[in-house]
Amino acid sequence: MTFRDFGFAPALLEGLDAIGFETPTPVQEQAIPPILEGKDVIACAQTGTGKTAAYLLPVINHIIDSPNKGVDTLVICPTRELAIQVDQQIEVLAYFTGIGSIAIYGGRDGHSMEQEKKALRSGADIIVATPGRLKAHIQMGYVDFSTVRHFILDEADRMLDMGFVGDIMQIMHQLPPKRQNLLFSATMPPRIRKFALGFMHDPVEVNIAIAKPAEGIVQLAYLVQDAHKKRLILELLKGKQGEDRRIIIFAGTRKNVGELARALKQKGFRAEAVSSDLPQEKREEVLLDFRNLKTPIIVATDVLSRGIDIQGIDLVINYDVPGDAEDYVHRIGRTARADATGMAITLIGPSSWRKFEQIEALMGMEVKKLQPPVAEWGFDPAQRSGRSGRGRGSRSGGRRSRRRSGRNRTGQNRNRGRTRKHDRPRAKD
Ligand code: AMP
């Protein structure tokens, strides 16, 4: 499949060619057709899947096909960083179309509010905004959203986590009831679906589903301070030495792999490290020793999480929470292969708690949490701080970012009303 199969306007295809997008990503393949048909869409897709272009491309195409007089599209994002990024993608994708956008986000001085006000008054095809800041503009009475045809919520789960529901509802009151609603979210817990179904009409659901772990795997997780993870591993392995059980311990970095393997050997465990540092020949040798139980414990980076098929692995331990749900499923899938049952234990430190929550949400299941045998090693997630991105240091939206993003002084995308064919656009992220 190519982008041409969607029947996009030539000016949009030209932009796609220029930035080198050749084939649609899975979320684009699934979400673009129903969006082009004008349907409401709920999509579960993480950052990195191409979800931004999945909603921007059909919307931009619609504006090209049937131009609108006022503000056509409103995109709401949880953070100013994402708002800037989405606005930059519009600039790149719509480069040859003459369609323009404005980014509206807080954390800047009063002067920038004035600039945004001017930009809002002079209008734009697409507005990308954070909820709080947009609500502040709406309350001043000069925002006219009566012409909006597309309403998009990006990273909806984060927005709900950050307590933006009230702001979003107020913004929605300003929009015409007849409009297309699109909701994108990295996770799809029931509360997000309930929220979406509250204002959507017969939505099409798109799910870039990840494989679920095999049923036979018993999953457990320990809430443990990072400084005590090594001790906890030694404790968990105590008594398992003579049992001839195959155990794989996954760590996130080569450094952690090396350190942990050394610590285990020092305590008398028959353990070896496997990471990309190890020459292929040596790696094969270690795996052979693992298969024949000469070395029953392997400590590895994700080089081993995919593909290897060794029968009879009894236990997988995640010393570090893996980068994403896909990696988690691959790692723990090393156990319980071909109907055997196995166990997967994950050590969750305070800094990886949120990441693990996302993994659970993507798998649609909750993993049982345990406290370590020594009370001081553990931590209580209820007491962790700084969960949301709110209140982070402010970022200047002044001259520098204007220059970088090719904007005029009111913050408007300079593309508006113009088609420039001279320079090539560049992907910004
Ligand atoms: P997103 O998930 O929207 O944050 O996109 C992740 C990255 O993928 C961004 O850098 C996009 O520019 C890039 N991207 C999106 N769609 C495509 C595509 N079809 N081909 C190549 N890169 C893409």
Image (cartoon, rainbow, N blue to C red):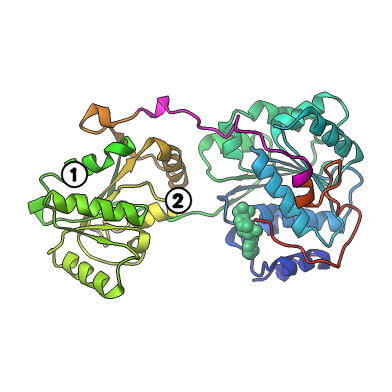
Q: Quadrant of residue 389?
A: top right
Horizontal relation, residue 318 to residue 24: left or right: left
Q: Main secondary structure of the magenta part?
A: loop
Looking at the image, which is closer to me, 413 or 405?
A: 405
Percent across and percent down for residue 297 are 19, 57
Q: Which image quarter holds the N terminus?
A: bottom right
Percent across and percent down for residue 132 are 70, 29
Q: What element carries label 1?
A: helix
Percent across and percent down for residue 101 are 81, 47
Q: Check if residue 426 falls in the magenta segment.
A: no
The residue wearing badge 2 is 324
Q: What residue appears at the point 41 percent right and 55 percent down from the top-left corner?
A: 327
If you read the primary sequence from the N terminus, does the residue marked by circle 2 or circle 1 appear first? 1
The residue wearing badge 1 is 234
Label 1 CB, ligand 1: below 8 Å?
no
Q: Work out which residue is located at the far bottom of the displayed protein and give it.
A: 281
Q: What residue appears at the point 28 percent right and 67 percent down from the top-left corner?
A: 309
Q: What residue range appears in magenta?
A: 380-400
Which amino acid lies under the numbered mark 1 shown in the image of this protein? Leu
Q: Check if residue 395 falls in the magenta segment.
A: yes
